[in-house]
Amino acid sequence: MNMDALLLSLRLALCVSALLLAGGLPLAYWLAFSKWRGKFLLETVVAMPLVLPPTVLGFYMLVAMGPHGPLGKLWQVFFGHGLAFTFEGLILASALYSLPFAVQPLIASFESVDRTLLDASAVLGAGRLRTFRRVILPLSIPGVVTALVLSFAHTMGEFGVALMVGGNLPGVTRTVSIDIYDHVQSLEYAEANRMALVLLAISFAVLSAVYAINRQVGRLLGRRLWTPWTAK
Amino acid sequence: MDTVDGEVNRAALTARVKMERLRRDSPPFLLDISIEVPPGITILFGPSGAGKSTVLDCIAGLARPDAGRIAAGQEVLFDSLASVNCPPQSRRIAYVFQTLALFPHMSAEENVAYGLDGLPHGERSARVEEILEAFGVGKLRARKPPEISGGERQRIALARSLVTRPRVLLLDEPLTGLDAELKAAIVDDLRAWNAARRIPILYVTHTREEVDALGERVIAMDHGRVVSEGTPMEVLEAPRRNRLAQAAGFENLLSATVVDLREADGVMRVRLNGSLSELEAPLGYAAAGDRVRVAIRAGDILLATMRPEGLSARNIIEGRIVAMETRGILVRARVDCGVQFIVHLTPGAARSLGLAERSRVWLVLKTHSCHLVEE
């Protein structure tokens, strides 16, 4: 079994989840509370990866990260090397692809916080940041957990974007799903099966964790969390 | 009231607010009021939808008026002309919401300490301790709101708002759903707390009982405007608008025509439209032939099974009971006298008089129980 590919996939999924949490919290806050009329445009952009084929997204990411693309040039300036076919490039592209899986549960849980609590916090002297830290975030923990778990799971199983942006460099961009694909191409079914089973087991474990949390929290809060399966 | 005292007046809350809210399926709602709230409890009274909560939201800074000026003492919090709009977190105005809005993930103690963020730890816990004791909820400090009973939750919400030493306190029907005894106990604690501090307290309610219980000063509102101001007696006993009359507990609202004025006696006679019955009512701003409305509380009407004699009451009308129903400790009778009256009596009285549907009865009304209401 190719442990390198498995470890790489885990490392990638962890990095992507962390990056999405850091970027997703402010983005989801803005999407949940902004009263700007054009907000739907950004909402659309965030939801795009749900409907776009990963190859399309991957293709444009590849172009943007290439030596002549804006991201690629910028990266060259700061780090002295290109972005395409690197682990960092793969993180960035995967994060974009999993963005809705992190942002939408966060928005849903922020929006479900009773607005009177936010008013109460304000009249008690708290600014926005303190209200977010002390009231919104603690009441949205289940949403944060869902966001983390979903971005992790989605990145673990991701194939199209990884193939387009990462290529197939062992230990750098060769993830589990690409490894499986390679084995199948070379008719090594036994090897492919072993990797596929590992991925299957991980996905099952992660999703059952989400459902279990959802159930627990649903009982506590009297409502269900956002998941792709409960989305309207 | 001690509002003439200059020292006290300097702490008064003044609010002049104009605001238009567009609504679906109905004409836009216009809020246009000017109020002054001196230290002590002032009640903002009116039916639901009168705009009471919106006034509180504007004062707290949670809603923005289209125009106006809001000031706490000398400090201007909002002024549309001078483009002043102080954000809610720096107004130092405490607000107890109808739902109380206690933070469900924090203990009572953490809830109360929430507004004391800038203070050193020692002083903070001392103040939390002090106020929890003042409102009699010291033993609940470690509990979270869902584990705390009604009444005690209200006390904690009050403590949380007052611990910050606000300059104004806004209360939006915070005692709804509590029984009278519990309400009175909480109001007593609030009064005791405010006795030393004397801040303006604006208490919103739509129930008459609370006005009677709290009553220092009442501002009555309807349709976004102030309709009357004064002591509870002045405001409630002379309701000038229909909706206000209903909210103030006048079950009988009858159309009538003025027959004549007897100014020497301070009364006028009106004929109830749709019947030949006449009533004597206190003299009002009306002339013979004017159409007016008369508001009468169902509990102010006496029922007799024989035509009574030797009474001071001037209005005695014959009728027949058409319906009776018992609601808890109250019997509600509908009496047809050409027009229908609602009369409240106790189950004991109904039993001893042997009242039933189709019984013949006489209604007895004091002149001063008949209130004239503006159309």
Image (cartoon, grey):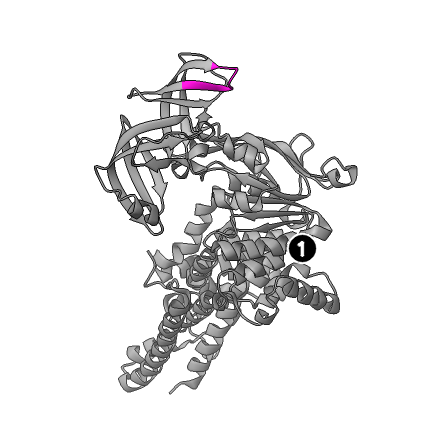
Res. A132 image quadrant: bottom right
- Amino acid type at image mark 1: Trp
Q: Quadrant of the C terminus of chain A?
A: bottom left
**How many numbered discs, if any?**
1
Q: Which residue is mark 1?
A: B193
Nearer to the camera, B309 or B325: B309
Is residue B169 highlighted in magenta? Answer: no
Task: Point out the stretch of residues depicted in magenta.
Answer: B262-269
Q: Position of residue B350 (x, y in %)?
A: 31, 45
Classify residue B188 by image quadrant: bottom right
Q: Quadrant of residue B360?
A: top left
In which quadrant of the rendered image does the N terminus of chain A lie? bottom left
Chain hosting mark 1:
B
Give x and y (percent) for residue A216: 39, 72
Q: Position of residue B213 (x, y in %)?
A: 54, 47
- Asked whether residue A100 is in view, the answer is yes
User: Residue A204: percent from the left, percent from the top?
Assistant: 33, 77
Q: Is A97 rendered above or below residue A209?
A: above
| Residue B18 visible in image | no
User: In this picture, is A174 found above or below B135?
Assistant: below
- The residue at the point 39 percent across, 19 percent down is B270
In this view, the residue in front, A158 or B274, is B274
Residue placed most toward the observer, B256 or B268: B268
Which SS class for mark 1? helix
Q: Residues within 10 Å of mark 1 (few under 14, many from 20)?
A: some
Question: In the image, is B369 to the left or to the right of B271?
Answer: right
Q: Relative to B226, is A148 on the left or the right?
A: left
The residue that appears at 55% across and 54% down in the rendered structure is B184
Residue name at image x 48 percent, y 27 percent? B240
